[in-house]
Image (cartoon, grey):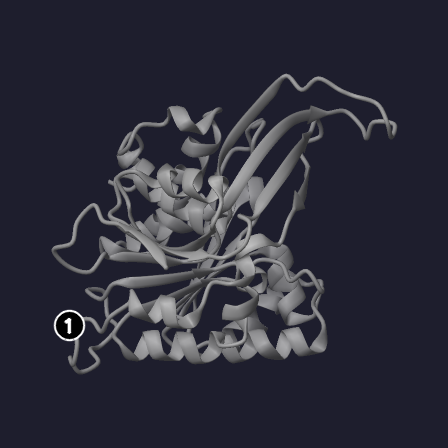
Amino acid sequence: METERLSDRSDLSPLNIVGDAGVDLVLGSLDGWPTIGTELLMPRSELRAGGSGANSALAARHIGQRAHLISAVGQDQLGHWLAEQFTGLRTSLEVCDCETTMSVGLMHACGDRNFFTTQGHLQRLSAAHVLQHLPPVGGQGARPVARDGTAPIALFTAPFLLTELRADYEALMAEVAARGYRIALDTGWPPEGWRDGTLSEVRRWLRHVDHLLINDLEARSIAATEDLELALQRIAAELKPEACLIVKVGARGALGLENGRRVEHAIEPVDIFDTIGAGDAFNTGYLSSRLRAAGMAEALAAGCRTAAAILARFPRKTIRAGEFADCVA
């Protein structure tokens, strides 16, 4: 069983997002952990769709990028509510016979945060559902096409949280690439930590990736070194020669490697209350810019502009569709 809402059924979406969608309750700010058994009043809160996949899709709506979210929801009231949060976007949501995943995000005055997340439906998103909604570029029966600048992108997010999908991840990405899509990947952070088996698993994924979008801590963890420059070299060696490596460095901006050339985009640090989904918003801005045939430098700038514009708004439900289109224009 699934729910599908399409804003445009005329052709394939240029940006397809395969990842997690859940319900987020964001509260803040805390100056310190309260004593057990006490109660605190929070000055700010928002109930919204969350998760890397959902954040990326909503960012697409904010910048006016046509996108397709392939994810799942639970078979409960929260699941129905969650499915309704993506108005204006094409969605293909697998309805799972379990409760919808929910996260409580506690924002701290220092700018850091904590998440408390239930497993829920995230364990159930299936490879069969994903492939059903990523048909071959050019239509059923079409021969694979070159994944050049004209090909649509499939962005895979939060693989470690999608238990059932994770088991088939390498084969899934290989099949989607064979169907003519450019592959983008944001690994996120594995709940089990960066064990040897996890590192080997990720390295097998990398051979299929056209755009790897990770943060600096993830880069150092994947490369097993505290030296970021060495980490870039090691990861680039694992990727295809023509692949792009993008590393998000938080409030400092982002850097990218493409065809042996390094590009950096620095930004001025700003004080933002709600930094949840910063990397996801960056990913969408960056990929949207690449879909417009922009080079690395402009795509990094577009990613940073998109993240800054979205994060500066709280609550985010006040952002109008296409309001931040100039971030990638």
Q: x and y percent of residue 52 in the render?
A: 49, 50
Looking at this view, name the residue that lies furthest to the left.
10
Q: x and y percent of residue 241 in the render?
A: 40, 78
Q: Quadrant of residue 252?
A: top right
Side (left or right) of 33 relative to 192: right
Depth check, front residue: 153 or 303: 153
Q: Dot 1 corresponds to which residue?
A: 139
Image vertical order of residue 166 relative to residue 123, above or below:
below
Q: Quadrant of residue 139?
A: bottom left
Q: x and y percent of residue 102 in the render?
A: 58, 43
Image vertical order of residue 276 relative to residue 69, above or below:
above
- Image quarter of the C terminus: top left
Q: Secondary structure at mark 1?
A: loop
Residue 208 visible within the image: no
- Image quarter of the N terminus: bottom left
Give, as a three-letter code, the residue at label 1.
Gly
